[in-house]
Image (spheres, rainbow, N blue to C red):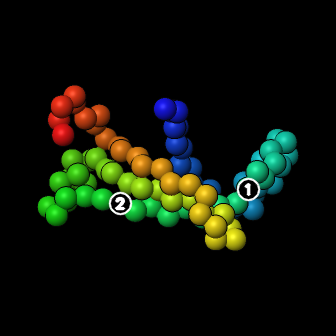
Amino acid sequence: MGLEVEAKLKVDTHHSLRERLIALGALCASRVLETNHIFDNADRSLLAGDRGLRVREYRTVVGQASSSTLTQSGLRPQPNSF
């Protein structure tokens, strides 16, 4: 399984960020729309414990499904904890 590293950065405008990336030699590989489906218990105990379970769905700009990923955040489950 691959390792995902995610960084969230606040930018004033997307335009200036795109210009800077192009200046650095970056190319647009594709454009996708991302939808996150968040799952929790009825008592919202995952959120309360800074944990999360999500299905992240990626679609191409023309609307064709391309892939989905199941992600878990927060503490790693212990063996036999399910």
Q: Quadrant of residue 59?
A: bottom right
**Amino acid beneath label 1:** Ser
4, above or below 10, in the image = above
The C terminus appears in which quarter of the rendering? top left
What's the residue at 25%, 54% (across, down)?
47
**Amino acid beneath label 2:** Ile
Q: Earlier in the sequence, mark 1 or mark 2?
A: 1
Q: Is residue 20 visible?
A: no
- Left or right: where does residue 51 sit relative to residue 17? left
Q: Nearer the viewer, residue 22 or 80?
A: 80
- Tag 2 residue: 38
Identify the element where label 2 is drawn.
strand
- Tag 1 residue: 30
Identify the element where label 1 is drawn.
loop
What's the residue at 16%, 64% (across, down)?
42
Q: Counting other residues with Cα less than 10 Å from the Cα at mark 1, is it few (<14), some (14-19), or many (20 or more)?
A: few
- Left or right: where does residue 44 sit relative to residue 31? left
